Image (tube, rainbow, N blue to C red):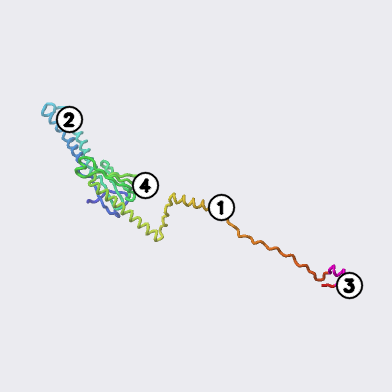
Amino acid sequence: MGEYHFPVPGSIDEEKIVLFVRKHWAAYLGQFFLSIFLFFFPLALLLVIYLNDKTIFTGLVLNLIVLGASTYYLIISTFIFTSWLSFYYDLYIVTDESIIDVFQQGFFGRKIVQISLLRVQDVSSNIQGLFPTLFAYGNILIETAGEQTQNVLLEQVPNPQEISAKIIELHHKLIEVEDRHHQLLEAEGVLAPTPQPISENAVQEREKTKYQELLDKEKNPISMPPVEESKPIPPPEPNTEGEIRSDDLDKGGEVDFK
């Protein structure tokens, strides 16, 4: 594995590089054969014309042929070199925390995409075609989750099944590490415990219970303690002390005061 000298977002010095992948060499075969054809076809055509009629390559015609051939080969050389740069400097780096996609754009352009492994939701690999099947290379589609969904396509990488399985493995390991770190922070009191989400059924059951309690209160109001009936107060006994009775008056004589 060679060293990586291109600047990337963040600092990957603290991260461990697990995979450093370039495109499979067989993916460049199509451009290679096309470049050879574009380079040698005009030469072969000029050679056939020259063998049939040598007098045509004289004077102004020769000058036009030289000017046209120079312009053509300048364009073709630029195309071949640009395609080789794009093939060689398209890099895919997988660390223990993130995925970095470096896309070469021409001579002086470079696009870098970096996503966290925590955002990885699904990884799928695809091998399609004659050359990809023979040389075992293909594409890997990485789907991410979050508010801004961003998919990353790793094109024409060797052994796509192994790379996708490794990415999923790193994703699961990182989730376990983050969960343990979060639990330690909660145990130390740094973070408040994460409230558990309440399901919709639980909310409905809670509302139903409260409503049932209100109905029970209406049906069975709170009974007050029975009030003891007060006993009738007997009338006070008449005070007969010093009272003159009528019987004593009828008898005459002395009145007996009691």
Q: Please report whichever mark, 1 or 2, sits nearer to the chain's N-terminal start.
A: 2
Image coords of residue 80 (percent x, y): 21, 39
Q: Distance between the residues labelled 3 and 2?
A: 182 Å
Image coords of residue 163 (percent x, y): 25, 49
Q: Which amino acid type corresponds to the residue marked 4 in the rendered image? A: Gly
* Comparing labels 1 and 4, the label whose residue is closer to the camera: 1
Q: Report the residue marked by disc 4.
A: 146
Which span is picked out in magenta? 244-255
| Local crowd size for mark 3, using a 10 Å CA cut-off: few (<14), some (14–19), many (≥20) | few
Q: Distance between the residues labelled 1 and 3?
A: 78 Å
Q: Please report whichever mark, 4 or 2, sits nearer to the chain's N-terminal start.
A: 2
Q: Please report whichever mark, 1 or 3, sits nearer to the chain's N-terminal start.
A: 1
| Local crowd size for mark 1, using a 10 Å CA cut-off: few (<14), some (14–19), many (≥20) | few
Q: Report the residue marked by disc 2.
A: 65
Q: How far apart are marks 4 and 3 (CA)?
A: 125 Å
Residue 98 inside the magenta-drawn segment: no
